[in-house]
Image (cartoon, rainbow, N blue to C red):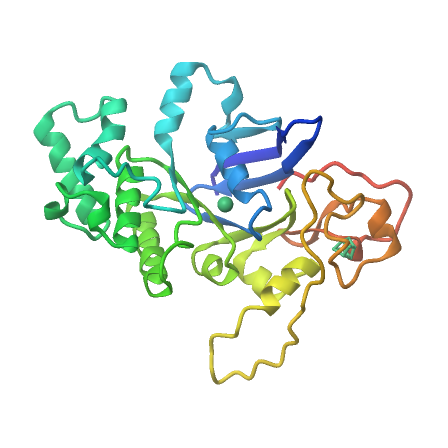
């Protein structure tokens, strides 16, 4: 498998004044293979959108590195960076807010092509817009209309067409379906899956809803308070979640098959997510964890491989203690 993206110990801190630092992303490490969908899930405020925006370069990183096709993006010169941005596009959560209300659909989809001087011939560019509209299940009659004339699902299709305009390899989809009606969500997920097959796309799919993420992701990382707490293949995560946080998230999802009796006990998490300004010492999840032990307040759990390609940061899986911990993150 070819590695497309490697994120190493990425950190994004915001200085929010009065000497306070908000640690939105606090050291995440993962990779994404070419052609796969990597899902990041977590509650709102866990830093998943910030991670996506930092990877794509909308935010400067505080520390760590993002390597795309073997090239460190932070050391790219401006010409390389421009070409890199063509490869990497983003789909946003709120399709309405991300589309200029005063532009027609044709203008919205053409704009990235203009910026990158693609299809300089007017008719060719228009044909390209028509093709993209068809690719996302709309049609050429939509080209001269304005965003407000469309439903939420259609607007997200326009946002997807715009993201595809530059023929990217990699798309970061930041909660692309959260703002849509449930009935429309599956349609957009199916569209993204079809486009991935047709165009060989790689996705980073960010969401708070584990059930939707499972349908599209090959591997999933679970994020809590700026950190990854578990990472593995999508099936393994659902069959055998290891981290108490993942177990709680999964226990809240109903089993879709009505013939299977749901005997699982729902794990209710106590307390609130702590502030990323003053994260707890030791394990960031400890004030809500039903399994918390003394060590959880003292030592930050190491990121360890508990099964093949199944990583978790939790003291429940510590091997026999043989001296000091190695706190460095294992590259995954
Ligand atoms: Fe819970 Fe401790 Fe594991 Fe953190 S390290 S998830 S507090 S058991
Ligand atoms: Mg978000």
Q: Left of 218 or right of it: where is 324?
A: right
Residue at image location 36% in from the left, 60% down from the top: 185
- Counting labels gives 0
| Residue 205 x/y as whole percent | 45, 48
Res 288 quadrant in image: bottom right
Query: Which residue extends farthest right?
Result: 323
Q: Left of 137 or right of it: where is 163?
A: right
Nearer to me, 96 or 256: 96
Residue at image location 33% in from the left, 65% down from the top: 183
Res 291 quadrant in image: bottom right
Query: Which residue extends farthest front?
Result: 18
| Residue 104 x/y as whole percent | 18, 38
| Residue 264 x/y as whole percent | 63, 77
Quadrant including the C terminus: top right
Query: Which residue extends farthest left?
Result: 123
Nearer to me, 62 or 181: 181
Residue at image location 21% in from the left, 35% down from the top: 103
Nearer to me, 46 or 66: 46
| Residue 19 x/y as whole percent | 71, 26
Q: Left of 134 or right of it: where is 19?
A: right
Nearer to me, 196 or 176: 176
In the rendered view, would you say 130 is above or below 153?
above
């Amino acid at each position: 498998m070819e590695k497309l993206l490697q994120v190493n110990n990425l950190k994004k801190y915001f200085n929010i004044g009065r000497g306070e630092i908000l640690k939105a992303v606090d050291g995440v490490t993962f990779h994404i293979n070419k052609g796969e969908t990597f899902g990041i899930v977590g509650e709102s405020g866990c830093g998943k959108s910030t991670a996506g925006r930092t990877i794509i370069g909308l935010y400067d990183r505080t520390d760590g590195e993002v390597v795309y096709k073997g090239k460190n993006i932070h050391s790219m010169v401006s010409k390389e960076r421009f070409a890199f941005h063509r490869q990497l596009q983003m789909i946003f959560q709120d399709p309405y807010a991300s589309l200029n209300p005063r532009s027609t659909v044709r203008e919205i989809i053409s704009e990235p092509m203009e910026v990158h001087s693609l299809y300089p011939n007017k008719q060719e560019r228009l044909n390209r817009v028509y093709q993209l509209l068809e690719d996302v299940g709309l049609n050429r009659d939509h080209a001269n209309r304005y965003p407000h004339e469309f439903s939420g699902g259609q607007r997200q299709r326009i946002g997807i067409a715009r993201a595809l305009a530059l023929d990217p390899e990699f798309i970061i989809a930041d909660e692309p379906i959260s703002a849509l009606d449930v009935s429309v969500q599956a349609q957009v997920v199916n569209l993204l899956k079809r486009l991935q097959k047709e165009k060989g796309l790689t996705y980073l799919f960010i969401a708070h809803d584990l059930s939707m993420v499972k349908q599209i992701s090959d591997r999933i990382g679970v994020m809590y308070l700026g950190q990854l707490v578990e990472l593995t293949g999508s099936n393994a995560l659902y069959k055998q979640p290891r981290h108490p946080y993942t177990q709680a998230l999964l226990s809240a999802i109903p089993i879709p098959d009505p013939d299977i009796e749901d005997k699982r006990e729902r794990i209710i998490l106590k307390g609130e997510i702590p502030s990323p300004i003053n994260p707890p010492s030791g394990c960031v999840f400890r004030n809500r964890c039903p399994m918390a032990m003394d060590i959880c307040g003292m030592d930050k759990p190491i990121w360890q491989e508990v099964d093949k390609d199944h990583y978790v940061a939790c003291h429940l899986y510590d091997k026999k203690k043989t001296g000091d911990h190695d706190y460095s993150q294992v590259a995954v």
